[in-house]
Image: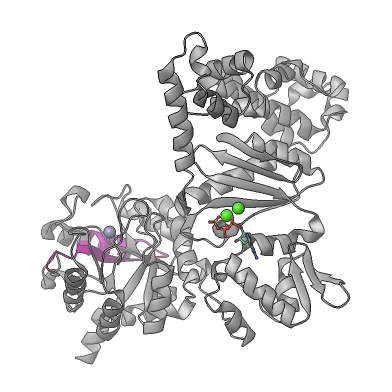
Amino acid sequence: MATNYEVARIFLEMAEALELQGQDPYRIRAYQRAARTILALEEPLAAIRARGELMALPGIGARMAEKIEEILATGHLRAHDELVEAFPPGVMAIMRVPGVGPRTAQRLYRELGIASVEALEQAAQDGRIRRLRGFGEKTEANILRAIERGRLLRARIPLARAYPLAQQIIAHLRTAAPIREIAAAGSLRRMKEDIGDIDILVTADRPAEVMQAATRLPGVTEVLLSGPTKTTIVTDIGLQVDVRAVEPEHFGAALQYFTGSTAHNIKLRTLAVRMGYKVSEYGIFRADTGARVGGRHEEDIYRTLGLRMYPPELREDRGEIERGQRGEMPDFVEEADIRGDLHVHSDWSDGRAAIREMALAARARGYEYLAITDHSIGRGIAHGLSPERLRQQIRAVRRLNDELPGITVLIGSEVDIRRDGTLDFPNDLLAELDLCIGSVHSAFGLTEAEQTERLLRALRNPYLDIIGHPRGRLIGARDPLRLDMRRVMEAAREEGAAMEVNAWPERLDLNDADVLLAREIGVPLVINTDAHAPEHFALIFYGIATARRGWAEPEDVLNTLPLRALLPRLRRHQWRKAA
Ligand code: DGT
Ligand code: CA
Ligand code: CA
Ligand code: ZN
């Protein structure tokens, strides 16, 4: 008798195949809806059918009920068998090669027996495709180019693209196969800013089903490897994904191993050997007797070696193991430490939401404060505010703050640092603000000497509290500014200014190495989202991860402080007090 899960899986595969064929979206959704209903059931479908109540289920009409009956009775659905025959996984992969599509894939399969992307590439190189009716050299060249492009795209991918994809893959695998544990490992778990491939570990009673499901994930363009415990696929953004199934009692050890980094693992294993142990992806063992000491849980490995478990973000062999051996593993900054966001845009400049909406969203997150920091006039394209508009905004924010309970709304500005290092608003206006972020949004191409001088000059302005996204980079789109970061940070520390860790996923700026430097120099940090819409506050975790990769502790980060402790730490209050 087919299980609920098996019925749902057949329906999900139907939906995917129909989608690839460009069939009626209504039919596709009907299958998806039925599958979701079935996966949510607590009772076997067979029992519901026995009571004659299948059609009482949401999303199950007469035709779906009939299909469920067929699967329960025979273990199969004829329509599904036909689809699988017409579209084996390799053919599905071919259909996803840009420009190929279902009809072409079908013909290539039927007439030339091509059932994988590799076979397709070979056939195109051999000039076999142009011999098909309706195909020519041009089609062949296009196919080769599309395959090649897919490969090139397989270069490293920004975390901002890989992370959501990994979440989707995990969610999808959970619905497509009965899974016990599932976790991302590798550089993604370490929250590295660029990802070579996604590594996913699972435990399941029937791993083969998980492997099957992995080859059929939405967006798969190629199945590179499909074995009983390991599947490697390529997705349409060119990212490779390894899915591995391990035994439950090995899960912790495997997670430790595949989280890496390789350098961290090597150091850890060397330490283990010195202590009379052996660490592998299967567990931690006594070297003399071979007895297994642990491995079900990741902590087993670290604990046995006398270490606290390292947060994945720290596992880069930057001295963390030595530090752990000395018993120095503090609590690093985490999302719960953050009490407010100091870099927030509204619809007064290029944000999407009203100030009040942003404030309500921040309050809903449990924040104690936020600072509205729209752009200054020099950013014409971002609807930067004129001095008059900023004066209006100051009044608007003060009024809102008076009437809105539960959160303090500060008024600030993200002021352009002009090419010559002057700020884009006069000091008498900056003085009316609660805080000022200075950012570079132009003249990215200056030499290192010029760029450094520009920031040093900006830092001499006593109203500049925070340097925003100090590197000015956009991952994959714009290189970081050339500047002497050490000198800039030293100047910021001298002046009492803070450096931003901008959590916007395309920025991650400061980056992890800069955060390490900031800690060495002793300049305070703030972690901000640069939110342009309410949902962007959630992106703070990218900034937290970046700061953790730089070993930041809560004390290093000003916006972990309650407001009354934060305000005196802002530069403008420091020099006023000193004066
Ligand atoms: P990536 O994919 O280039 O962004 O970086 P990772 O760290 O995800 O590397 P990957 O996917 O090649 O391997 C995943 C983890 O598996 C890696 O972080 C550590 C472990 N691993 C892989 N190869 C080796 C190795 O040769 N020795 C050791 N000790 N561990 C390895
Ligand atoms: Ca990886
Ligand atoms: Ca890998
Ligand atoms: Zn900015």
Q: Residue 412: x and y, percent? A: 25, 66
Left or right, residue 79 beside residue 199: right
| Residue 295 or residue 181, whichever sits in front | 295
Report x, y in % for residue 231: 68, 43
Quadrant housing the C terminus: bottom left
- Magenta span of residues: 394-420
Residue 70 in view: yes
Snapshot quadrant of residue 414: bottom left
Q: In which quadrant is the N terminus drawn? A: top right
Q: Which residue is pictured at 46% across the width and 29% down the height? A: 144
> Up-down: is 27 above or below 200?
above
Specify whether residue 410 is painted magenta. Answer: yes
**Colour mapping:** one colour
- Give coordinates of residue 216: x percent, y percent: 64, 33
Q: Is residue 282 magenta?
A: no
Which sits in the foreground, 30 or 288? 288
In terms of image quadrants, where is residue 219?
top right
Q: Quadrant of ligand 1?
A: bottom right
468 lies above or below 521:
above
Q: Is residue 448 left or right of residue 403?
A: left
